[in-house]
């Protein structure tokens, strides 16, 4: 039995006890299964995919969940997992029936010539998933009520537009998939052009490309699911504003970072929102939650910040959690975060969360120093942080170090100061 199979078995055992679960239990299962999601797809382990998607969804306020969790739930529903089919049925129900007034005109999923909207396909898929779930024995009163409402919506639409139900819906859906693919291709092209313009220092041109992507997101709501380029575009606009490259007073950098973090789960943007909450709003608990989520999604900077919070006992019962912090710092250090490398050296020097190893600690200190983070810089950073916890500005220590990948050339934006 390989690691993926062992993880799946353990997760299934834990999930069977879900009646007494809290958020950290779901987080534990997600962390356990996440490295093997693609392997479960190849092995067709639909139960493991369902458990991963379900736990992710419960952590992320479903239906505003991550694309990865959506895909896992979709695979599980396709594989015949009844609970996943119910999830998909509800998602399509709320998209179609409850969302018709908002999406009827705006969310066209095929070309205008075909006159078929996204919500109409969602009606069909919701009915199919409910039929499959009910056939397997699902009999929840709330879902029965949803189903009755769904049937009424279908009948009303048939009466108003019978021509849509006499055509080959499979062909229509294929056209829809083609248009979605064309849309993704266009967004990817604009994103690449925006990145190229940014690297060349043509910031206005880059902003034009990224803002065009944002416009596409607003006009093509039905096509935005699972598209990472939307979050990247918002994050890059916020980044250029933050760096002082764009002089557009009407654009608020925090709004772009928050949109990328909240709507599109962009981990880097989560770090910037955490910065803002910590230093501008002086709201440390909310900042830590943003960093924790960014760390879970693998952003090195968020991992380093959250590790600092863990070491200072700011996350649970005021007790430092060194082993977890060491794992996060190791990941961030491998990605080249100077402060993470230095702090990991401190843990090895003291033997906290890792075996005591002064030789390895010194090696880490040397690497950190070459990357621009020394003991003197760290002491000054900590001193400034303690003195200015709610108002530290990045440029106050910019001459000493560069802990953020962003260039804060005289801007009022802040960096982490836990």
Image: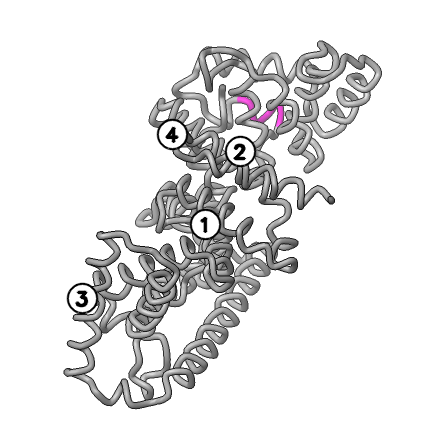
User: Which numbered disc, 4 or 1, marks the residue closer to the eye?
Assistant: 1
What's drawn in magenta, residue-wise? Answer: 397-401
Mark 3 to mark 4 CA distance (whole Å):
35 Å
Q: Which one is earlier in the sequence, the residue at label 4 or at label 1?
A: 1
Mark 2 to mark 4 CA distance (whole Å):
26 Å
Point 31% across, 57% down: residue: 90
Q: What residue is shown with label 3?
A: 101
Q: Quadrant of residue 41?
A: bottom right
User: Which numbered disc, 2 or 1, marks the residue closer to the eye?
Assistant: 2
Q: Which one is earlier in the sequence, the residue at label 1 or at label 3?
A: 1
User: Which numbered disc, 2 or 3, marks the residue closer to the eye?
Assistant: 2
Q: Say whether marks 4 and 1 touch (CB < 8 Å).
A: no
Q: How many marks?
A: 4
Q: Say whether marks 2 and 1 touch (CB < 8 Å).
A: no
Q: Is residue 153 visible?
A: yes
The x and y percentages for residue 355 are 75, 15
In reply to whether residue 127 is colored magenta, the answer given is no
Front residue of 136 and 144: 136
416 on left or right of 336: left
Q: Which one is earlier in the sequence, the residue at label 2 or at label 3?
A: 2
Point 33% across, 26% down: residue: 281
Q: What residue is shown with label 2?
A: 28
Where is the N terminus found, in terms of image quarters? Answer: top right
Which element carries disc 1, helix, strand or loop? loop
Q: What residue is shown with label 1?
A: 66
């Amino acid at each position: 039995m390989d690691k993926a199979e062992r993880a799946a078995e353990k997760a299934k055992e834990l999930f069977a006890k879900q009646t007494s679960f809290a958020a950290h239990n779901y987080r534990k299962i997600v962390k356990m299964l996440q490295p093997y999601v693609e392997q479960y797809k190849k092995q067709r382990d639909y139960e493991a995919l369902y458990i991963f998607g379900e736990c992710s969804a419960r952590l992320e306020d479903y239906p505003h969940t991550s694309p990865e969790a959506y895909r896992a739930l979709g695979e599980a529903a396709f594989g015949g997992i009844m609970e996943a089919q119910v999830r998909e049925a509800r998602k399509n129900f709320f998209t179609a029936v409850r969302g018709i007034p908002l999406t009827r005109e705006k969310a066209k999923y095929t070309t205008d010539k075909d006159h078929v909207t996204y919500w109409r396909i969602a009606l069909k898929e919701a009915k199919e998933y409910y039929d499959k779930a009910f056939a397997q024995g699902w009999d929840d009163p709330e879902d029965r009520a949803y189903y009755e409402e769904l049937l009424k919506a279908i009948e009303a639409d048939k009466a108003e537009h019978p021509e849509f139900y006499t055509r080959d819906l499979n062909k229509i859906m294929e056209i829809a998939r083609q248009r979605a693919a064309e849309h993704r291709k266009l967004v990817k092209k604009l994103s690449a052009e925006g990145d190229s313009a940014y690297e060349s220092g043509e910031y206005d041109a880059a902003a034009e490309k990224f803002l065009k992507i944002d416009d596409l997101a607003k006009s093509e709501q039905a096509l935005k699911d699972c598209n990472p380029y939307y979050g990247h575009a918002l994050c890059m606009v916020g980044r250029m504003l933050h760096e002082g490259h764009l002089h557009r007073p009407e654009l608020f950098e925090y709004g772009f970072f928050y949109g990328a973090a909240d709507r599109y789960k962009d981990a880097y943007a989560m770090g910037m929102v955490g910065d803002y909450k910590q230093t501008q709003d002086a709201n440390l608990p909310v900042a830590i939650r943003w960093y924790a989520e960014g760390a879970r999604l693998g952003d090195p900077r968020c991992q380093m910040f959250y590790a600092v919070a863990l070491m200072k006992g700011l996350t649970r019962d005021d007790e430092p959690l060194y082993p977890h912090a060491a794992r996060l710092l190791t990941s961030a250090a491998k990605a080249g975060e100077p402060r993470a490398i230095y702090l990991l050296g401190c843990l090895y020097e003291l033997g906290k969360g890792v075996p005591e190893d002064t030789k390895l600690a010194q090696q880490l200190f040397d690497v950190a120093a070459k990357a621009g983070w020394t003991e003197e810089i760290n002491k000054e950073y900590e001193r400034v942080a303690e003195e200015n916890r709610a108002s530290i500005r990045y440029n106050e220590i910019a001459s000493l170090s560069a802990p953020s990948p962003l260039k804060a050339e005289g801007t009022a934006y802040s960096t982490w100061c836990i």
